Amino acid sequence: MMKLELSDNFEALVLALELAITAPDESMSKKCSDMADQLAGYMQVSEVELAKQIALSNVFEECQ
């Protein structure tokens, strides 16, 4: 199992969003989405929007 070291809540939010998008089932997606919601509560709206853009870009980049 690969262990990631995240340096801050922003990186954690991006990862939680990526995992929510790519989760193998709805239950796992919901868990990741809930984590993302909790992390987003500590951030500015602009930071959350940027994290969403980065997560989407990373996911779609992986698909190509």
Image (spheres, grey):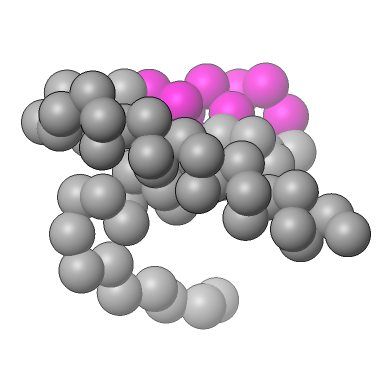
Tell me if residue 29 comes above or below residue 23 in the rendering.
Answer: above
Front in this rendered view, residue 28 or 12: 12
Q: Is residue 34 visible?
A: yes
Name the residue rendered at 88%, 59% in the picture.
64
Front in this rendered view, residue 50 or 2: 50
Name the residue rendered at 62%, 55% in the picture.
58
Q: Position of residue 27 (x, y in %)?
A: 60, 23
Q: Position of residue 39 (x, y in %)?
A: 23, 34
Query: Quick one: quadrant of the N terminus?
Result: bottom right
12 displayed left or right of 44:
right
In the displayed image of the protein, which residue is found farthest to the right?
64
Dividing the picture into quadrants, the one containing residue 37 is top left
Q: Is residue 28 visible?
A: no
Name the residue rendered at 75%, 49% in the picture.
60
* Residue 49 forms part of the magenta stretch: no
Dividing the picture into quadrants, the one containing residue 13 is top left
In the displayed image of the protein, which residue is found farthest to the left?
42
Name the residue rendered at 23%, 23% in the picture.
45
Chief SS of the magenta region:
helix
62 displayed left or right of 36:
right
Q: Position of residue 18 (x, y in %)?
A: 56, 45
Front in this rendered view, residue 60 or 19: 60
* Residue 31 forms part of the magenta stretch: yes
19 displayed left or right of 5:
right
Q: Which residues are magenta?
A: 25-36
Front in this rendered view, residue 54 or 21: 54
